[in-house]
Image: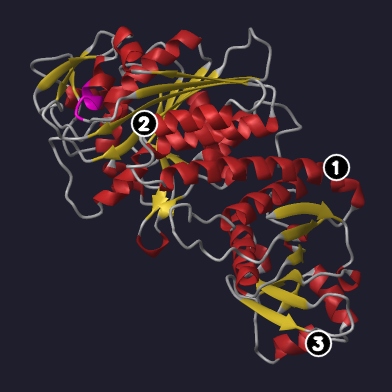
Amino acid sequence: MELNVKTTLAPDTRSDCLVVGVFERRKLSAAAQELDAALEGRLTALLKSGDMDGKEGTHLLLPDPGPIPARRILLVGCGKEKDFDARRYRKALTTAVKALQKRHVRDAVNYLPDLPVRDRGLPWRIRLAAETLQQADYRFDALKSEKDTPPSLRRMTLNVIDKAHLPKAKRALAIGNAIAGGANFARELGNLPGNVCTPSYLASTAQKTLKAFPNMKVRVLKQKDIEALKMGAFLSVAKGSEQPPRLIVVEYRGADADERPVALVGKGITFDSGGISIKPSASMDEMKFDMCGAAGVLGTMHMLGELQPPINVVAVVPSCENMPDGGANKPGDIVTSMSGQTIEVLNTDAEGRLILCDALTYAERFKPRAVVDVATLTGACVIALGKHPAGLLGNDDTLIRRLLDAGEKAGDRAWQLPLWEEYQDQLKSNFADMANIGGREAGAITAACFLARFTKKLKWAHLDIAGVAWESGNRKGATGRPVPLLSQYLLDQCGRDYTLE
């Protein structure tokens, strides 16, 4: 969808459709009031008749409204005005775009960004509108013989009341489009099946797509390279599959060469059968999403390539399959990580931490000022937090706080879990330096405790995105999270031109 920003007067605007807000108790927004005056009270009469009362999630289309240039008016319910916050704003935007897509509207002018949102300014509203609308426009039909009918909505103008604010709005639109583009790139990778999106495919796609951006360098390490690095934990997971592993390293250099980078590490298990500790067959197809940490990291690099902000970032993505052939890890096997620490593999389905621990050790060579790993790591995190926030743990309070703040700003929230030393006892092994699981209790925390043993030299945070990376059921598909959170975290470090309030 083509988005732009413009200052318009609703009664004088020619468009297929004008989108305006209505608050509960039938209160018209400012743009809707202007239209109502031009239409001699027609909107007020409609509301009084009971056709709409402004409840959030509702809408009403008025065709052929009368003596104005626009062909239609879409009224969007926004709930109670005093409660109109970021969540309700996003919901109103989503309601609007879905309603327009169903009615063969080709272009629209959207006045919802004019609405005051609690604690948020115009640049933030424009950016969130771009993200929400572009992600609502996404569909995955690459592997269908008959493609989905594309939505008729091609263009949307986001209204800006004051012309003086157009430069900031244009900048916000560019940022929103870049974040949405990164999230949709991550969704595209996540939605591909495991027989297409293999480790080699993931690596070649990263090379082809990201190398096209300025200031971006992509290297792919193959099995012999990984063996030379002595990544025994990573290789132990890969050896159960016929698909060879890949270590994808992407460097974005937007700042001075001597500025230490932020490192992002993404789990790239392109299919997870559980290995010898095999998963139940029900919903195992969703284990193609076990590389959504990698997809989120690569999607964030895509955002950086689009925007070219002044920051240095390196992405490290270990990628392989977890399969149960004759060479696979067995419960009780002991492997040696790149760091030299030994690990007793008590459950082969706790494989993500095995590939991440070596990738975290590898990331040390870049001397990062902060490291964030992203992984669909534990079902325990879903049980603890559900499908709304990602789990967040780490060893640096400032880093944790910045990530939490970024999630709140971006509408891509995380929730901190404790990383206390007492939990480390659950990883004790009689035969190795540690076990790869810590029992049923606090599974998301003990998984992070495992990774903490490989990050003692780093300022490190861990995002467990198992609950937020994809949706199941009729809406099954990758979400693109946590690209918005990671993007906000990085852009917050790039100065006022990139920080939108």
Callout in the foreground (1, 2): 2
Circle 3 is placed at which residue position? 42
Label 2 crowd bin: few (<14), some (14–19), many (20+), radius 10 Å: many
> Relative to residue 202, is residue 27 drawn left or right?
right
Q: Which residues are magenta?
A: 236-240
What residue appears at the point 73 percent right and 88 percent down from the top-left corner? 46
Q: Which residue is mark 1?
A: 167
* Location of residue 280 with respect to 155 vertically, above or below: above
Q: Main secondary structure of the magenta part?
A: helix
Task: State which quadrant residue 243 falls in.
Answer: top left
Label 2: which secondary element = helix
Residue 344 magenta? no
Q: Amino acid at mark 3?
A: Arg
Query: Where is mark 2, residue-wise?
Result: 199
Residue contact between numbered discs 2 and 3, judged by CB atoms under 8 Å: no
**Residue 437 spot, x, y in % from top left:** 19, 30
Compared across the picture, whether 293 is left or right of 223 comes to: right
